Image (cartoon, helix red, strand yellow):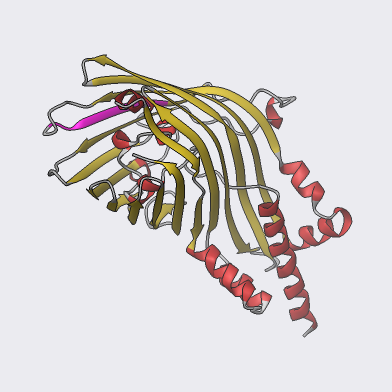
């Protein structure tokens, strides 16, 4: 009984540390994006050729040149939440006062992830701006092979900043070029804490030293540049190429290189979309490849994205796709002054599809004026 009580106490300390990490805005880095498009999450994270409005700032600024009206989108708020199935399960178990040891035992070896984000801004003819914030957490609890005591491993990051973009037609109404300038602050922490260490650190300092030792902050100024080919004849496919994270090294505000957050990986992304449609509906089939030059040294299956969308009068949309080898699903409803997106997606946290699957739910509510 005494041993069991001690294990429960250790488990409580581990979960306390994890909640401490969340409450102090320590969130995980996954796709290295300032903002994730809810619509793309539902379609396998593919379809960058179709990102418009303030989403285009972060995916494909060339599409800003395709805004034909003086005012495009006005976004007052657009809160988005993402949570893995494992994370929701732990939350429900905590709410039901389930035995703490059983909760930790059930979480062993299962990845937990969560994210929240918001963007506010507007798009106009050939230009857009946005203020944004995104915070993520990736965590896993495992049992130490020698002691059997649970250990928490958390990777976390919060990004916030401002983006301004321009897009122009360079060849008729077919070829578009665009660029987004970004100033962004990043706070990053990676923690690996055993239950015993957590108990000692929290008992002595309240946990502040753990975070202070791991937390790295910095500010970067950089850009995304993209090229879009959109033939006026809709029977031809649309194609994009984007160079992302140019100059995104967090050298401002960090005293030494070792105190800086991880620099954003500079990548070349590309994709192609086919858009058959009728008078009242459009459909899209897309294939996107992230990091064409493979600077991330990931296998092609983790960088390949397939997606499809069926859109009825731009009011109701049905989405589906394959992200890193796993299926995704989504829906959206757009009343012009409010848009709701929701769906399910999966990501691979290991090396190959099937290694460490993380399945998550997402939802976004956008208030303002949307086309």
Q: Residue at x 37, y 36 (%)?
A: 290
Q: How many marks?
A: 0
Q: Is residue 38 above or below residue 221?
A: below
Please state which of residues 237 and 64 is positioned toward the viewer in this rendering.
64
Q: Quadrant of the C terminus?
A: top left
Q: Position of residue 77 (x, y in %)?
A: 51, 44
Q: Is residue 54 magenta?
A: no
Task: Answer with left or right where residue 232 lies relative to residue 188.
Answer: left
Q: Position of residue 208 (x, y in %)?
A: 81, 49
Q: Is residue 238 magenta?
A: yes
Residue 356 shows in the view: no
Please state which of residues 277 and 366 is positioned toward the viewer in this rendering.
366
Q: Residue at x 60, y 33 (%)?
A: 262
Q: Position of residue 279 (x, y in %)?
A: 13, 43
Q: Position of residue 256 (x, y in %)?
A: 72, 25
Q: Quadrant of the N terminus?
A: bottom right
Q: Residue at x 25, y 48 (%)?
A: 309
Task: Give the residues in magenta.
Answer: 236-243
Task: Answer with left or right where residue 172 lies relative to residue 54.
Answer: left
Residue 160 shows in the view: yes
How would you classify the magenta stretch by its main secondary structure? strand
Task: Answer with left or right where residue 50 lies relative to residue 361.
Answer: left
Task: Answer with left or right where residue 342 lies relative to residue 111.
Answer: left
């Amino acid at each position: 009984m005494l041993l069991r009580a001690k294990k429960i106490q250790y488990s409580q300390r581990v979960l306390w540390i994890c909640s401490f990490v969340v409450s102090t805005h320590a969130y995980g880095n996954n796709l290295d994006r300032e903002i994730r498009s809810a619509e793309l999450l539902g379609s396998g994270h593919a379809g960058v050729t179709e990102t418009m409005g303030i989403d285009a700032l972060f995916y494909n600024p060339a599409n800003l040149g395709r805004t034909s009206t003086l005012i495009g989108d006005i976004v007052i708020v657009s809160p988005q939440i993402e949570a893995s199935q494992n994370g929701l399960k732990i939350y429900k178990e905590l709410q039901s006062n389930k035995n703490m040891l059983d909760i930790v035992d059930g979480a062993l070896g299962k990845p937990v992830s969560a994210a929240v984000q918001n963007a506010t801004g507007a798009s106009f003819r050939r230009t857009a701006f946005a203020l944004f914030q995104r915070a993520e957490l990736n965590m896993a609890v495992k049992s130490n092979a020698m002691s059997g005591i649970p250990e928490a491993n958390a990777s976390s990051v919060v990004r916030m900043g401002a983006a301004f973009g321009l897009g122009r037609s360079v060849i008729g109404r077919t070829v578009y070029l665009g660029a987004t300038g970004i100033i962004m602050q990043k706070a990053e922490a990676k923690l690996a804490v055993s239950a015993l260490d957590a108990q000692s650190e929290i008992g002595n300092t309240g946990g502040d030293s753990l975070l202070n030792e791991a937390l790295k902050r910095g500010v970067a100024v950089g850009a995304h540049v993209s090229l879009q080919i959109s033939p006026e004849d809709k029977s031809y496919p649309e194609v994009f190429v984007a160079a992302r994270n140019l100059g995104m090294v967090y050298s401002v505000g960090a005293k030494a290189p070792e105190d800086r957050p991880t620099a954003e990986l500079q990548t070349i992304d590309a994709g192609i979309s086919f858009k058959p449609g009728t008078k009242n509906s459009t459909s899209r089939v897309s294939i996107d490849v992230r990091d064409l030059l493979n600077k991330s040294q990931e296998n092609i299956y983790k960088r390949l994205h397939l997606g499809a969308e069926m859109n009825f009068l731009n009011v109701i949309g049905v989405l589906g796709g394959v992200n890193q080898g796993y299926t995704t699903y989504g829906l959206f409803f757009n009343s012009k002054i409010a848009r709701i997106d929701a769906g399910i997606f999966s990501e691979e946290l290991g090396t190959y599809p099937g290694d460490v699957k993380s399945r998550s739910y997402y939802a976004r509510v956008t208030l303002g004026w949307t086309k």
